[in-house]
Amino acid sequence: MEEPVRICDLMHKGVIFCYPDDNLKEVAKMMHLNHFRSVVVLHESGEVWGLISIMDLIPYYGQNLERFCAEEVMRPYQIQIDPQWPIEKAIDLMIKGKFEHLIIVDPHAGMKRPIGILSSYDIVRYMSHIKIGHFNYMLKLASDPESS
């Protein structure tokens, strides 16, 4: 019998983070430089406060991103996700809450300390059986009708 897949099996270990008073230009730059679709917002104590995804930044297109801080845009952190939970529990939460990313916390720490992120993309990649790093070679380009 196959072992059940747990959240910790698919999540990204570690997080990129900002602080509540960091401006959105800094947040967007972090996402771009790290090739991540979300940034965790941490209180200076190291506890999770919220999450900003690329979709949270899109409404600010054309505006001065330095005028807005992370705390104004973040989605507050409300669900504690244990890395040992089965992946089906995470999928259910993502569907019901319309979340693309879940912040994974250390269930043994006294505070809500982030240890990773699980994205909808991580789940889809697993479903497709594509190993990390291999998807670059599996891209299919539409054939050009004029070159046939």
Image (cartoon, rainbow, N blue to C red):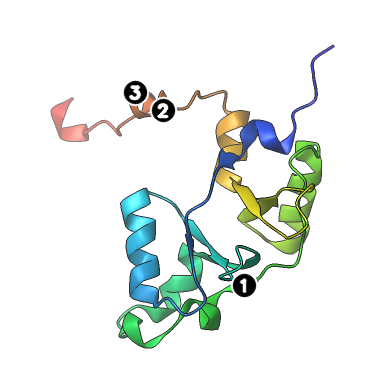
- Say which amino acid is labelled 2: Phe
Secondary structure beneath label 1: strand
Which of the 4 image quadrants contains residue 143?
Answer: top left
The residue drawn where x is 61% and y is 54% is 101
Q: Residue furthest right?
A: 1
Whether residue 42 is situated above or below residue 24 in the rendered picture: above
Mark 1 surroundings: few (<14), some (14-19) or many (≥20) residues within 10 A: some
Residue labelled with disc 3: 137
The residue drawn where x is 79% and y is 48% is 107
Residue labelled with disc 2: 135
Say which mark, if any, is on residue 56: none
- Say which amino acid is labelled 1: Arg
* Quadrant occupied by the N terminus: top right
Q: Nearer the viewer, residue 83 or 36?
A: 83
Tell me the distance, in whole angstroms, between the alpha carbons under discs 2 and 1. Answer: 30 Å
- The answer to whether marks 2 and 1 mark residues whose Cβ atoms lie closer than 8 Å is no
Q: Position of residue 146 (x, y in %)?
A: 15, 33
Q: Residue furthest bottom?
A: 67
- The answer to whether marks 3 and 1 mark residues whose Cβ atoms lie closer than 8 Å is no
Secondary structure beneath label 3: helix
Whether residue 112 is situated above or below residue 49 in the rendered picture: above
Tell me the distance, in whole angstroms, between the alpha carbons under discs 3 and 2. Answer: 5 Å
The residue drawn where x is 50% and y is 58% is 38
Residue labelled with disc 1: 75
Tag in front: 2 or 1: 1
